[in-house]
Amino acid sequence: MLLKILEDIMYHNNNRSRVRRPIRKTKVKKTKYILFSSTIIVLLTLVFIKFFLPALNSNLKNSANVSNDSGKAVWVENKEDTIKAKSKKDKEKVEDIEAKDDSDAVIEPGSRAEEEKPEEQESASNEDKNKKNGEYDFKMDSAVGSLIYYNQMDKRWAEQLYGPQDPIGTHGCGPTVMATVVSSLTDTQMNPKEMSDWAYENGYCAVGNGSSHALIPETAKAFGLNVEPLYRASAEDIRTALNNGKIVVALSGHGIFSPDDGHFFIIREIKPNGKVTISDSVKLEHVFMQWDIDTILSQASPVSSAGGPFWAISK
């Protein structure tokens, strides 16, 4: 009986070892497989990072730095080249804006030289020469025809004096506006510095405060132009003057056109949509905008004399 019991015990022990042994072997095999696989993956990752990733990044960088402007590839190698490329594009954008048909700038003679007659080419050459000598910056459409543009902040005269002490750049809007009017509507060509000297000699410079309001009508008369004061003008008055082939010189107060109490500018034409364009001798961007007449009227100086704050001028 005892022997039988011992045999049974031994038999059961043998069965347990037979059952457990395969389980332990399976676990060992799985562990080895996981360790081996992990090692291979880590090694492959290190190889990829060391050898393949740098080459891939280089290719992507070169591809991203290619610009296809004008059908030609342009490589931007560093930050300095990127800045140069951006500056070039910004400059081209400004030139495109000024050359657009709806920008109100008149195309200068000579841009279609192959279609011009010899006398027209000579005239264009003289006009370009005058432009380079500081006679004007460019031309715009207006109710009286082509109107030249001067900017009083131009380095050619911004620091030159209007009167005994005031720079044209900060005090010369009046002479700059009248230089535009006289040079565009008469045979006399005067730049802002020349008109500033004329205004000072004739008593229209208000030293420290710009110009007297009489500068506008009296200068127009002195150079043989017709001038009509539009005191307390309405939108209809402005519209009528422009439709009748006149430009309107306006005097604004503190606001959109000037941080100071007074600034002269020109209302030059009315568009089919009823809006107007202007010539502002300080802010060039205003030249390429269209304005509601009511906006212009809201900016008019509340204090004016000599028939202002609006004057209609024509040949």
Image (tube, rainbow, N blue to C red):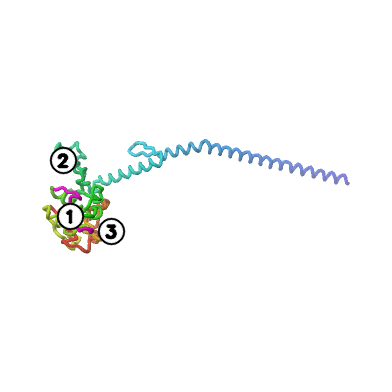
Discs 3, 1 touching: Cβ within 8 Å:
no
For label 1, the SS is: helix
Which residues, given as a range, are shown in magenta?
A: 188-209
Please name the amino acid that badge 1 sits on. Answer: Tyr
Is residue 289 on the magenta stretch?
no
Q: Quadrant of residue 249?
A: bottom left
Residue at 46%, 37% in the rendered image:
58
Measure the alpha-carbon separation of dots 3 and 1: 24 Å
What residue is at 88 percent from the left and 46 percent from the top? 2
For the residues marked 1 and 2, what is the alpha-carbon distance in whole angstroms? 33 Å
Please tell me how crowded label 3 is: few (under 14), some (14-19), or many (20+) other residues with Cα within 10 Å.
few
**Mark 1 residue crowding within 10 angstroms, few (<14) / some (14–19) / many (20+):** some
Are circles 3 and 2 on residues that touch, CB within 8 Å?
no
Q: Amino acid at mark 3?
A: Pro
Which is more foreground, mark 1 or mark 2?
A: 1
Depth order, front residue of 38/52? 52
Q: Position of residue 63 (x, y in %)?
A: 42, 38
SS at badge 2: helix
* Residue 259: mark: 3
In the rendered structure, which disc, 3 or 2, sits on the residue that comes first in sequence?
2
Residue at the spot of label 1: 200
Above/below status of 310 relative to 28: below
Above or below, comparing residue 106 to residue 163 in the picture: above
In the drawing, does residue 220 fall left or right of residue 82? left
Extreme residue in the left direction: 224
Alpha-carbon span between mark 3 and mark 2 = 41 Å
Q: Work out whether mark 1 precedes mark 2 in sequence or the reverse, and give the earlier one.
A: 2
Q: Nearer the viewer, mark 3 or mark 1?
A: 1
Q: Give the image location of residue 257, x and y in percent.
A: 26, 57
Q: Which residue is mark 2?
A: 123
* Type of amino acid at the residue the image marks with label 2: Ser
